[in-house]
Amino acid sequence: MLDVVVVGAGPNGLTAAVELARRGFSVAVFEARDTVGGGARTEELTLPGFRHDPCSAAHPLGVNSPAFKMMPLERYGLEWLHAELPMAHPFLDGTAAVLARSVAETAASFGPRDAGAYRRLVAPFLPKWDTLAHDFMSLPLSRLPRDPVTLARFGLVGLPPSTWLTRRFRDERAKALFAGLVAHVIAPLDGIATGAVGLVFALAAHAGGWPVARGGSQSISDALTAYLQDLGGSVHTDYEVKRLDDLPPARAYVFDTSPTALARIAGFGRYYERYRYGASVFKVDYALDGPVPWTAKEARTAGTVQIGASSAEIGSALRAASREGRAPDPPFLIAVQPSIVDPSRAPEGKQVFWVYGHVPNGWTGDLTDALERQLERFAPGFRDRVLARATAGPPELAARNANYVGGDIACGAASGLQLLLRPKVSLFPYSTPHPAVFLCSSATPPGPGVHGMSGHNAAKAVWRRLRQA
C-alpha cells in the first residue's frame, strides 16, 4: 500500500508530492492529461518553433515561493530569467509607470507627488519580505507566525479594499498601476483584502523580480517532476480519475482539483455547493514578426505589461466581467513578453506574446477585436506584427484544464471572504469530510498563482495525520 496518492500534476499537486516524498513517504501522482503541468505548461499553439504558455507565464510568486526556495529545482533545469523591468504600465501620452526592482525607480515613475507615499507604503515590509511571505502564504497558520508584529501590520494595511489604500496616492499613475496589480487575481478593486493583493505583488517584484522560466512555464513542472522521481515518487499521466476506487490503495489521498470535482469523485455530495467560481479571461497567444511596437519605451523592456488607461477604466472592466455579466470594452489587459529575455521561445527575430482580458464566467463570445483595439491604443501597428494567433475563451480554457470551471483560472472567485478563507470558512482548509482525503489546489490558501504553497501547506496537514495514524 502506498502512503499517499496525489490526483493532479499541477504545481500544487507536484509540490505536495515532493514535500511528502522528502519526508520518506511513498507517493504516486496521477494526472488525467498526457503531460504534467496543470496551469504551468508550454506548447506550440500557433506556428512551429513558437513555444507559448497556455496559462501562467510570469512568476513573481514562483520565484518568491518559500516552498520552491527549499527545493533544488535549479538542478533539474529551472532557471529564472529577469527582464530589465519586471513590469510596466503605459499610458496614452507615451509615458509609463513602472514596477522596477528598485523602490526608488518605481517611486520616481509615479511622479513627485506620490513618490514619497509609495516609499512609505513598502518601507515597513520590504526588509522583512522573506519572513512576511512565509507567514502570509502559510495562512491560516498552523503554528505561530515567525514575525507576528509585521504580519499584523501588513493586515492592517492590506485588509481594507485597494480603493482605500490608493487614497494615499494623488495622481493617476500610481493608482492605475496598483489597480492593475489587484486585477491579477481578477478581483473587483473594492473587495476585502484587495489592498493586500496589490501590495504582495509590488513587494514580490522588489524582492525577487517578476521572471519567466527559461523555455517556458513547463520547466517549473518538469523540474518538480524530476525532483519527485529522484526522491522515489512516481508520476502516471493519461490516468483520469472518476471515483476513489479508480486509485490504488493508500493511507491518504491529496487532490489538486477543483472542490466540485473532488466532491464528485469522493462522493461528498453538496459539501462544496456554496463555493463560488469567478470571472474568466479571454486569452490570445501571438506569434509576432518582431517586438510589440509600444509607444512607451519602458514597455519595450518589461517582462509584464499592464494595459489600462486609468484606474477607473480598470475598475470598470473588472466590474463588467465579475459583477455585470458582460465583456468589457475596452478590456483591461495583462501581457507577458517572454521573448525579450528568452529568444529560445521563437525562431530568430520573431517573438511570442501572451495577453488576456477579463470576461464573465462561461462567456462564449470573441474578445479578439476589442483586445487588439486596446493594444493598438498603446502600441500602434501591433496588428501588422501578427503572424498567427491562438485564442482561448472560457470554454477552451475549461476544456484544457478541468480546474478552470467556467474558465476561472483562479479555481474559485478571489473576492470577498473567499479570497482569504477558501474553499470553506475553516481553520483546516485542506481537510475534507473524509479523514484520509485532502485538497491542495488553488481553491485552498494562499490561492491562485504558480507558487506551490497550497500543495506545501496541504502536505503538512497530511504528514501530521500520517504521523498520528
Image (cartoon, helix red, strand yellow):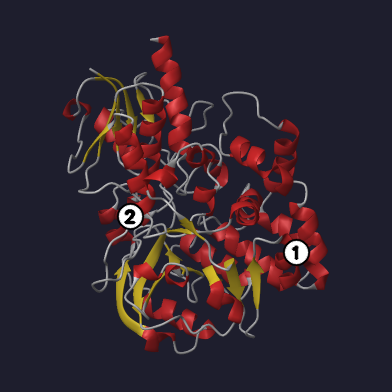
The total number of labels drawn is 2
Above or below, 310 against 255 in this view is below
Percent from the top left, x then y, of residue 240? 19, 40
Q: In the figure, is residue 348 to the left or right of 419? A: left
Q: Residue at x 29, y 30 (%)?
A: 233
Which quadrant holds residue 364?
bottom left
Residue furthest top in the image: 469
Dot 1: few (<14), some (14–19), or many (≥20) neighbours within 10 Å?
few
Percent from the top left, x then y, of residue 467? 42, 13
Percent from the top left, x then y, of residue 466? 39, 15
Percent from the top left, x then y, of residue 109? 71, 72
Q: Residue at x 48, y 31 (%)?
A: 457
Tag 1: amino acid: Ala
The answer to whether marks 1 and 2 mark residues whose Cβ atoms lie closer than 8 Å is: no
Q: In the figure, is residue 305 to the left or right of 231? A: right
Q: Is residue 137 visible?
A: yes
Dot 2: few (<14), some (14–19), or many (≥20) neighbours within 10 Å?
many
Tag 2: amino acid: Arg
Label 1: which residue?
A: 104
Label 2: which residue?
A: 41
Q: In the figure, is residue 127 to the left or right of 234? A: right
Above or below, 286 against 4 in this view is below
Q: In the figure, is residue 377 to the left or right of 220? A: right
Q: Residue at x 77, y 47 (%)?
A: 124
Q: The C terminus lies in which quarter of the figure?
A: top left
Q: The N terminus lies in which quarter of the figure?
A: top left
Considering the numbered disc 1 on the image, is that residue within a helix, a strand or a loop? helix
Which circle marks residue 299 in the picture? Answer: none
Q: Earlier in the sequence, mark 1 or mark 2?
A: 2
Alpha carbon distance from label 1 to label 2: 35 Å
